[in-house]
Amino acid sequence: MNTSQQSQMDHNGNATALFLDSGQYTADSILDYELVYGKAFVSPGGKACADDLIQKMPLDAGDLVLDAGCGLGGSAFLMASKFGLRVDAIDLSENMIALAQDRLRELGYPKTIQLKQADCLQIDAEQKYNGIYSRDVFLHIPEKQKLFSVLHRALKLKGQLLFTDYCCASPPWDETFSAYVEKRGYDLQTVADYSALIEQAGFQVIEALDRTEDFINFSEQELARIETLNATPSVKKHLASDWLAKIQRARDGNQRWGQFLAIKITE
């Protein structure tokens, strides 16, 4: 990470909106990701994966869910339109929120979705949510203990936390993966370390799964889709290069992908 990028992190090393919006999540980059993942999605597996994950939270219609790092709003729309859930959808990236507002208007913007730009670490809620859902977001937040404490406080007793995230093998990593993590400003955990952090915050861990093989399968399907995109050759070449590198990092064993489900068991 260069000096300019470091100046765009907060004093604890967490990504800021400026860091995200001027780097990985410029408007053009987000739109390129959306071409691969599908309309209103920017996470591995797109809509089909989101649908499967939402069903892992046995919530009732009318329950309130926090979508922490909602991206373009695709999961929030699914939760509201298919499962009858109320959703507070937040994202730190101003670019994401602006585009999410456009996508939700195009999809019919259910009144049960509240969308706003906000920081996960600044959630000011106590025993408000029946569930918290997040897709590949927490890697941007080094303050994991604070994060899970905030999320724990925001959930009702017996509320559920479901998230996926980029994870890692135990160090040492090879030079290529180390450089990638440094450039992106990621804070990665092993699946086991994530599980321990969740338990320390007062959750009962129901699932802590290494789904790297599924991640590779999703990525290979997405790579094949890139070849068929209605995009310029340069965009397709850039996306294909990114996806090939992602697949290789996972195959090499340094990059992992975790899925976690936990229940709040303490006040």
Image: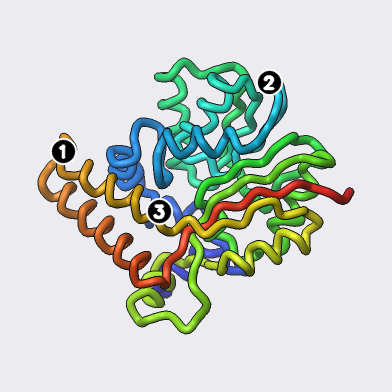
Can residue 16 be seen at all in this image of the molecule?
A: no
Assign a secondary structure to mark 3. Answer: helix
Q: Earlier in the sequence, mark 1 or mark 3?
A: 3
Instruction: State the image coordinates of residue 136 (x, y, percent, origin top left).
Output: 50, 51
Between the C-alphas of marks 3 and 2, the distance is 30 Å
> Which residue position holds label 3?
215
Label ID, residue 126: none
> Which residue position holds label 1?
228
**Which amino acid is tagged 3?**
Phe
Q: Earlier in the sequence, mark 3 or mark 2?
A: 2
Q: Residues within 10 Å of mark 3 (few under 14, many from 20)?
A: many
**Which amino acid is tagged 1?**
Thr
* Residue 195 as seen in the image, left or right of residue 18: right
> Which residue position holds label 2?
61
Instruction: State the image coordinates of residue 22 (x, y, percent, origin top left).
Output: 39, 54
Q: Residues within 10 Å of mark 1 (few under 14, many from 20)?
A: few
The residue at 49%/46% (across/down) is 93
